[in-house]
């Protein structure tokens, strides 16, 4: 994908800040964030997790800085990390100052938890002098009680006002290296809050559905909220907050951006048919086997696993590479052209081998690699056998409809 051009979806123009080497906002690519779940004081374990997150596509990692041992850990982690590190601060403003001393590339402050203006301004002043950005991380679950009362509960306006209050303290000390989040666990509320915020500020926005929960529900909630906003051009950096290994968060974030065309594809885009009465293999098992086989391979290709040779190659003709099952054999196709027929037990191995070849040499070279007429002849043979055996109506729709009509007519 050499000529990758990110989709812009009329992206809202925001200011650009830098979190270490990663630009956020403006026309910078939308970045993926996640957070370590180790004790930050455990430097080795935390660094191990940071490396795993970076390998999974995470651009920026956040670590909690909740005590002096964590701040000391950050001093050792920051210089060894492959990605910028943000310190997450909840209650003690002195931990923010300690994290800055440790050399972090960014801070996240929760305005609901650090409320004294002099403390907020002390942190902002120090961050300003060091050129370190701060995220105003409003969280629906820890909103300032005064705002909760003023707005009659947790509302989008209350969250936006919380961010604006914090911004005013920052302005008083001339600090503007800011990004903002207004996360809630309720998706429609989160979407409303970000839309409202985006109308009143041009600071970059960090999107997330907080406490989205375990898989798969958490993935669905986070995707619903984040992608709705991204498609409206709102959002400059994202985080999936899942109750799971944080590597899942990084993978999800990366995959969402790749599937929306907002980041260049780095990993296999595996497409697979949902299977039906025509399937000649266990499509679910083969697709899962293929997913595991490609999980750690950085191959920016679309690869299809299709259950039958009758419709598979045609339906997945846009894929770089695919395999369709027919007659205990796998028919490999490249850009819709049959290139090889392999035994069913070798389908996934063959996919991996051809994908590696295509990655190195391209699809045209792959088609030229073999005598396609031979594979096409074999595929045509299996297709006609399948059609003869299962006919055009593999799910027996016509038969069922006739039966339904009979039942309704009381025959
Ligand atoms: S017709 Fe073939 S390719 Fe389409 S869903 Fe059924 S098995 Fe899969």
Image (cartoon, rainbow, N blue to C red):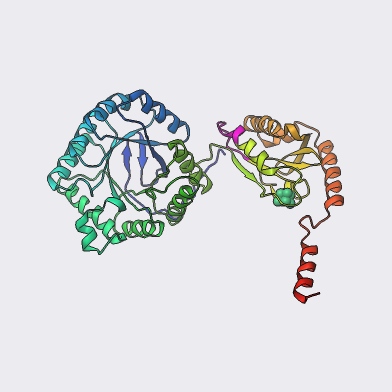
124 relative to 359, above or below: below
Q: Where is residue 191 in the image (x, y as percent from the top left)?
A: 39, 57
Question: Which quarter of the figure has residue 342?
Answer: top right
| Residue 301 counted in the magenta span | yes
**The residue positioned farthest toward the left in the image shown:** 118
- Viewport quadrant of the N terminus: top right
In the rendered image, the vertical position of residue 76 relative to residue 30, given as above or below: above
Asked if residue 105 is among those painted magenta in the image, a careful observer would answer no
Q: Is residue 54 above or below residue 284?
A: above
Percent position of residue 44, x then y: 36, 23
On the image, which quarter does residue 101 sit in?
Answer: top left
For the residue pair 222 and 3, the one nearer the viewer reads as: 222
Residue 83, given in percent of the width and then of the height, sits at 38, 31
Q: In which quarter of the image is residue 359?
A: top right
Residue 150 lies left or right of residue 46; in this view the side is: left
Q: Which span of residues is magenta-colored?
A: 292-302
Examine the rendering and report whether any part of residue 364 can be seen. yes
Report whether 287 appears left or right of 205. right
Q: Which residue is drawn at 15% across and 43% down?
A: 119
- Quadrant position of the C terminus in the picture: bottom right
Q: Which of these two is toward me, 187 or 132?
A: 187
**Quick one: which residue is furthest to the bottom in this view?**
409
Q: Say how many tags the image has.
A: 0
Q: Residue at x 24, y 54 (%)?
A: 162
Closest to the observer: 141 or 376?
A: 141
Q: Is residue 320 visible?
A: no
Magenta part, dominant SS: loop
- Left or right: residue 268 compared with residue 101: right
């Amino acid at each position: 994908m050499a000529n990758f051009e990110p989709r812009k979806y009329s992206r809202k123009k925001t200011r650009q800040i830098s979190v270490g080497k990663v630009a956020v906002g403006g026309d910078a690519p939308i970045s993926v964030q996640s957070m370590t779940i180790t004790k930050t004081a455990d430097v080795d374990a935390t660094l191990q997790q940071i490396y795993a997150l970076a390998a999974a596509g995470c651009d920026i990692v956040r670590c909690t800085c909740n005590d002096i041992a964590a701040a000391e850990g950050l001093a050792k982690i920051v210089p060894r990390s492959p990605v910028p590190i943000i310190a997450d601060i909840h209650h003690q403003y002195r931990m923010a100052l300690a994290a800055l001393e440790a050399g972090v590339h960014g801070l996240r402050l929760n305005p609901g938890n650090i409320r004294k203006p002099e403390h907020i301004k002390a942190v902002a002043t120090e961050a300003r002098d060091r050129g370190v950005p701060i995220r105003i991380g409003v969280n629906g679950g820890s909103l300032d009680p005064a705002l909760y009362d003023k707005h009659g509960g947790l509302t989008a306006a209350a969250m936006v006002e919380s961010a604006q209050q914090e911004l005013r303290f920052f302005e008083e000390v001339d600090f503007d290296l800011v990004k903002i989040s207004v996360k809630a666990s309720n998706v429609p509320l989160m979407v409303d809050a970000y839309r409202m915020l985006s109308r009143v500020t041009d600071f970059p926005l960090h999107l997330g559905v907080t406490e989205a929960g375990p898989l798969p529900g958490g993935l669905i909630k986070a995707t619903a909220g984040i992608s709705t906003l991204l498609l409206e051009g709102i959002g400059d950096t994202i985080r999936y907050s899942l109750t799971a290994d944080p590597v899942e968060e990084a993978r999800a974030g990366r995959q969402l951006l790749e599937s929306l065309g907002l980041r260049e594809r780095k990993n296999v885009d595996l497409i697979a048919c949902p299977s039906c009465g025509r399937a000649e293999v266990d499509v679910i098992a083969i697709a899962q086997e293929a997913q595991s086989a490609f999980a750690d391979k950085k191959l920016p290709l679309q690869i299809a696993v299709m259950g039958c040779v009758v419709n598979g190659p045609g339906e997945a003709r846009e894929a770089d590479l695919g395999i369709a099952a027919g007659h205990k054999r796998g028919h490999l196709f490249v850009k819709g052209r049959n290139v090889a027929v392999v035994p069913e037990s070798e389908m996934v191995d063959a996919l991996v081998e051809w994908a590696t070849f295509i990655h190195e040499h391209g699809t045209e070279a792959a088609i030229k690699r073999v005598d396609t007429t031979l594979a096409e002849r074999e595929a045509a043979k299996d297709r006609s056998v399948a059609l003869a055996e299962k006919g055009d109506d593999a799910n027996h729709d016509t038969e069922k409809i006739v039966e339904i009509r009979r039942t309704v007519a009381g025959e």
